[in-house]
Image (cartoon, grey):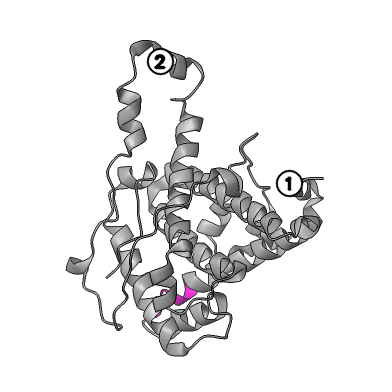
Amino acid sequence: PSSRTRFTQPKTKRMACCIPLHNLMFFNPQHSSLLWRVSFLRQAGFRPGFGSVKTARSFSSKVTTPRTWSTAMYESLEVGHQQQSTELYSLGSAHRLALRFCGFYSEESTLRRAANRLYVSASAQSSNGAFLETLKIERSFRGDFGIIALHVWMLLRRMRAEGLAGKELSQAMYNVFQNDIEQRICAEGLAVRASKLLRALERSFYGSAVAYDEAIKKSSGGLTEALLRNVYFCEGEYEQARVLEEYVRYKIGCLGVTASDALLEGRVRFSNTQ
C-alpha cells in the first residue's frame, strides 16, 4: 500500500511526522496539543516525484569567511518569469482557451506550479558541486536530504509572513518535498522500506525545523550547532558549520527583501552565492 495510508490511522497513533505544515509554521511549545489535531492535506493525484521535478541548473558558488551582514547588503532572490510563461503568451487564442478549459489557469494548478518551482529552487544546492565542496557537505542521500531540508525550512519561514496564501503554498511545497524524497528513497533501492524511512525522515525534518526556529533567534552558537547536527550529522568541522550559518542568515535576509508576488509565484533562486 502507498505510504499515504498512514494518514488514515487513528488520531492517538499519529506521530509528529504527520503534522500539517501550517501547525509547524506557527509552532508554540506551550500549545503542542495543536500538533495532533489535523491530518495532512494531500492534493489528489499530484505526485511530481523525483522523475518529474526537474533538477535545477547548477551554478558556481563561493562562500567567503563568516561576516556580519547588514540590511543594505541583502539582495532579492527574485528571478524573472520563466521562458514557459513567454511561450504560453505566444500561443494562439484557441490554444489558450483549451488550456483554460482544461484547468491550466485554475487556482489549484497555479498553486501547484508555484510550489514545484519553489521546491526546484530549494533542492538546487544539493546538486551544486561547488557549493557542496566549499562547505564540505557529504555527497550522499542523507547529505542531500539535510541541505534540501534546510532550504525548504528557509522558504517555509519566509512564507509565514504571507498569511493564508503563504500557508497554502507552504503545504503544497511540502507535499512536493515529501513526494520527491519518497522517489529518492525508491531510487536508492529501498522501496520495500520506503514507508518506514519516509516517516523517519519526516520526524527528522520536523525536529530540525524546530531547532532552526529556536536557534535563529540567538545571536551566535545555536544555529551552528543545529547545522552541525542536521546537515553534517555531527561528523563535520565546527568551522564549516559556522560558515554555513552565515550563508543561512544571509539568505534569510535576502528572502526578507524578496517581493511577495515573486515568492508566491515561485520565482525565487538561491544560487550565485558569493
User: Crowdedness of circle 1 by 10 Å Cα count: few (<14), some, many (20+)?
Assistant: few
Q: Residue beneath label 2, please?
A: 95
**Looking at the image, is mark 2 or mark 1 earlier in the sequence?**
1
Point out the image quarter for the N terminus. top right
Task: Please check the rendered image and state whether residue 35 is part of the magenta-colored stretch, yes or no.
Answer: no
Select label 2 or label 1 by which is in front: 2
- In this picture, which residue range is highlighted in magenta? 214-218
Estimate the x, y position of residue 207 in percent, counting from the top left.
Answer: 60, 69
Task: Please check the rendered image and state whether residue 217 is part of the magenta-colored stretch, yes or no.
Answer: yes
Left or right side of 172 for 67: left
Main secondary structure type of the part rendered in magenta: loop
Q: Nearer the viewer, residue 23 or 257?
A: 257
Left or right side of 253 for 231: right
The quarter of the picture where residue 199 lies is bottom right
Residue at x 39% of width, y 17% of height: 96
What amino acid is labelled 1 in the image? Arg
Q: Residue beneath label 1, please?
A: 4
User: Crowdedness of circle 2 by 10 Å Cα count: few (<14), some, many (20+)?
Assistant: few
Task: Farthest residue to the left: give it.
Answer: 72
Say whether residue 14 is visible: no
| Secondary element at image label 2 | helix
Q: Nearer the viewer, residue 5 or 30?
A: 5
Estimate the x, y position of residue 5 in percent, counting from the top left.
Answer: 78, 46
**Whether label 2 touches label 1, CB < 8 Å:** no
Residue at x 35% of width, y 26% of height: 88
Residue at x 33% of width, y 39% of height: 82
Against 210, is 18 above or below? above
| Secondary element at image label 1 | helix
How many angstroms separate mark 2 from mark 1 (CA)?
36 Å
Say whether residue 39 is visible: yes
Residue at x 49% of width, y 72% of height: 212
